[in-house]
Image (spheres, helix red, strand yellow):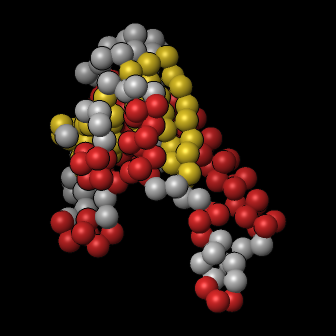
Amino acid sequence: MTSLLFAVDGSPISLDAIHRALTLVPPPATVTLLHVSASPAAEAGAGGIEGPVYTPGELETLREAEAHDAEEVLDKAAGAVPSGYQVERRTDEGDPGTAICAAALAVDADLVVVGSHGRGALARMVLGSTSTYVVHHCRRPVMVVGHHDDGETEPAAG
């Protein structure tokens, strides 16, 4: 393996996923860190008949804040990558599962690594699960690093 794609959201689970996966793949390898944020533009029309929720100026402010937050998440994730790996950064807007699958193809990833927050079956059914979506739709191998109630994480192949 020479190309890994890590979906990062700033959580300890996503940082632990980096550590665990890189124990399996020694340098040199290319590590692509991907942060996906919700698109404020998608929420702009949520006002219904009353019109948009945000003004164009408010949307721009939201985009700038999200870009800043994404850079902080990527900086934190890059700090978790040991020396010897080539690190690339990507940001995207929209649905995380769809964006992760698209990025995996775009960077020709040999492995996609995602963390799982460990929700139960009912919560996944109601809230959805990015990791479940990626496992079922990604056209690249996927490793899911799961979360346990005791605070430990455990990698699982997908």
Measured along the vertical axis of the image, is residue 96 above or below residue 100? below
- Horizontal and vertical percent for residue 19? 34, 30
Direction from residue 70 to residue 22 in the image, left or right: left
Q: Nearer the viewer, residue 150 or 18?
A: 18
Residue 8 in the image: state x and y as whole percent: 45, 42
The residue that appears at 26% across and 65% down in the rendered structure is 124
Residue furthest toward the right? 57
Q: Residue at x 21, y 52 (%)?
A: 148
x, y percent for residue 62: 70, 61
Residue shown at the point (29%, 33%) measured from the top left: 140
The residue sitting at the bottom extreme is 49
Numbered-mark total: 0
Indicate the quadrant containing the N terminus: top left, top right, bottom left or bottom right. top left
Can residue 112 be seen? yes
Residue 6 position within the rendered picture, expressed as x and y whole percent measured from the top left: 40, 35
- Where on the picture, by quarter, is residue 39? bottom right
Q: Quadrant of the C terminus?
A: top left
139 above or below 22? below
Quadrant assignment, res 18: top left
Which one is nearer the viewer's eye here, 133 or 82? 133
Query: Residue at the spot x=52%, y=30% of the render?
Result: 78
Residue 116 appears anywhere in the view: no
Q: Is residue 156 above or below residue 23?
A: below
